[in-house]
């Protein structure tokens, strides 16, 4: 190739890398067009220079196609799924079938929870305001394994059951969220705070419902 052709091809690869924000693709195209491995080093210099220049003038580091779509009012920062979740509040999919209780309950309370087919238990720790979400099925299994049902004649209705001692892998840490929040905000809170579940609480500190990651996942699937 002549010197002019080399400069032209390197300039084309640099323009491609800067406009598409794809330096590796530009270098691959340079190799395919020239079939000359010696052009890689000057090609890398041109591509790196173009990428750095583009990122200096456009710190958000978007390709030309993203920029053209932004000029047309298309918001790629929020994909359609996120936009749909932004239109749905947490109160729309929160679960109301729960029982709010302390870490210690009596045998009669435990039987009442099971008889009423409560799905979740929102447990408040005794020494703190931290809350744990646990499925009622874990309590039912615990009572069954202890064979408490067969010993009702000897067991007192006021026998204490410590819920934190029930062996289960489904115990979820829970944090509070406002009822005005959207599903996107709930999803981000679960991810950022590394919590497993949320409980919806209003300004009067009343718990309105519970929300887990699985509930959010089931909504958009």
Image: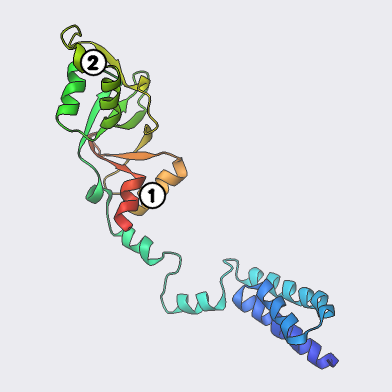
> Furthest residue to the top?
154
Assign a secondary structure to mark 2.
Answer: loop
Residue 49 occupies quadrant: bottom right
Q: Position of residue 195 (x, y in %)?
A: 42, 39
Disc 2 or 1, which lies upstream in sequence?
2
Residue 130 occupies quadrant: top left
Residue depicted at 35% across the width and 30% down the height: 132
Look at the picture and state if 172 lies above or below 72: above
Q: Position of residue 62 (x, y in %)?
A: 56, 71
Residue closest to the eye, 96 or 186: 96
Q: Is residue 207 left or right of residue 38?
A: left
Residue 55, disc: none
> Badge 2 is on which residue?
148
Q: Is residue 65 left or right of residue 96?
A: right
Residue 122 occupies quadrant: top left
Q: Marks 2/1: CA distance?
A: 39 Å
Look at the picture and state if 11 lies above or below 107: below
Image quadrant for the C terminus?
bottom left
Q: Position of residue 32 (x, y in %)?
A: 72, 83
Residue closest to the eye, 153 or 13: 153
Residue 187, disc: 1
Foreground tag (2 vs 1): 2
Q: Position of residue 170 (x, y in %)?
A: 37, 34
Assign a secondary structure to mark 1.
Answer: helix
Residue depicted at 78% across the width and 84% down the height: 35
Q: Is residue 61 left or right of residue 99?
A: right
Q: How is the image coloured?
A: rainbow
């Amino acid at each position: 190739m002549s010197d002019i052709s080399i400069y032209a091809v390197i300039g084309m690869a640099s323009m491609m890398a800067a406009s598409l924000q794809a330096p590796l693709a530009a270098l691959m195209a340079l190799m395919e067009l020239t079939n000359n491995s010696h052009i890689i080093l000057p090609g890398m210099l041109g591509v790196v220079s173009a990428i750095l220049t583009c990122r200096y003038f456009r710190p958000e580091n978007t390709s030309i196609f993203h920029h053209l779509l932004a000029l047309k009012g298309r918001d790629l920062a929020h994909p359609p799924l996120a936009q749909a979740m932004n239109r749905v509040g947490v109160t729309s999919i929160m679960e109301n079938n729960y029982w709010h209780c302390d870490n210690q309950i009596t045998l009669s309370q435990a039987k009442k929870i099971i008889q009423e087919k409560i799905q979740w238990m929102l447990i408040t720790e005794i020494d703190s305001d931290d809350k744990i979400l646990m499925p009622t099925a874990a309590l039912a299994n615990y009572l069954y394994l202890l064979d408490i049902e067969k010993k009702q004649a000897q067991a007192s209705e006021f026998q204490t059951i410590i819920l934190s001692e029930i062996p289960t892998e489904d115990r979820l840490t829970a944090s509070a969220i406002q009822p005005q929040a959207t599903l996107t905000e709930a999803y981000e809170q679960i991810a950022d705070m590394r919590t497993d579940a949320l409980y919806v609480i209003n300004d009067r500190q009343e718990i309105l419902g519970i929300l887990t990651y699985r509930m959010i996942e089931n909504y958009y699937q």
